Image: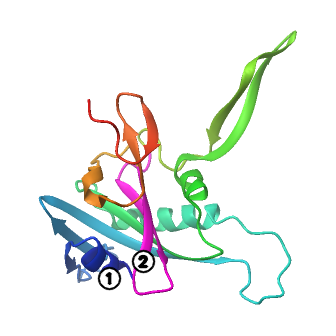
Amino acid sequence: MAAYFLERQLRYDLEYVLCQATQGTRTPEFRVKRDGIDLVVEVKTVVGGIPSDCGYTGAFLSPVPALRRAMKGGTGQLDKNAKNLFLIADWWLPTVSRDLAIDALYGDSLSEVLTGPSGPVGGWREVRRNAFCQMAKNTRFGVVGVLQWASCAECRGYFIHNGYAANRIPSCAFDSWPQLVLDETEKRMVWGSPPKR
């Protein structure tokens, strides 16, 4: 699924990385190149969610803990000196939504209001707790992509850039695909390419 997506849909030249002979050495799955962009690619599959039988009536399980475990498990395969793409093959039921993938990377979204001796001070604001990617933590992740298998040969996907990445991947690496990118001028993450100024 990942190889097809990278080679056929994104049009990268794909090279499989062979396992090293040294015991204990962990390697990524692929190296890909296109138009001067070189990426190291690690792929993990996330499986789970609701049971596949039609009679299930329980609550939907969140994929956030499974995504964080997958990312933690894949950190050792990422090259600290390279531009790293971490792909998640989504076999979660129903699917890994964009909001939950963002929560997995940037922390659980909570609302809080500051209070003083006389009550609330200001309005509600969004804060994030338990962030996986942050300043000086998990900076090897350049972009996390989520691939979902469509009802045909083509995959659907979206990409979330790590604003704290040591080696950032330009948004042109995934042109025409939905992606959450860092807007340097606004100092925030936005969907799509940031405005050119």
What's the magenta region?
137-161
Q: Which mark is residue 152?
A: none
Residue 73 visible, this orientation: yes
Which amino acid is tagged 2? Cys
Q: Is residue 187 left or right of residue 5?
A: right
Verify whether residue 82 appears in magenta: no
Q: Counting residues from the N terminus, which is met first, the one under dot 2 or under dot 1?
A: 1
Location of residue 173 with respect to 91 vertically, above or below: above
Which residue has dot 2 on it?
155
Helix, strand or loop for disc 1? helix
Q: Nearer the viewer, mark 2 or mark 1?
A: 2
Q: CA gap, disc 2 to disc 1?
A: 9 Å
Which residue has dot 1 on it?
4
Location of residue 5 with respect to 196 vertically, above or below: below
Q: State the residue lying farthest toward the left.
A: 36
Judging depth in this view, the residue of 41 and 126 nearest the camera is: 126
Q: Is residue 100 left or right of residue 182?
A: right
Which amino acid is tagged 1? Tyr
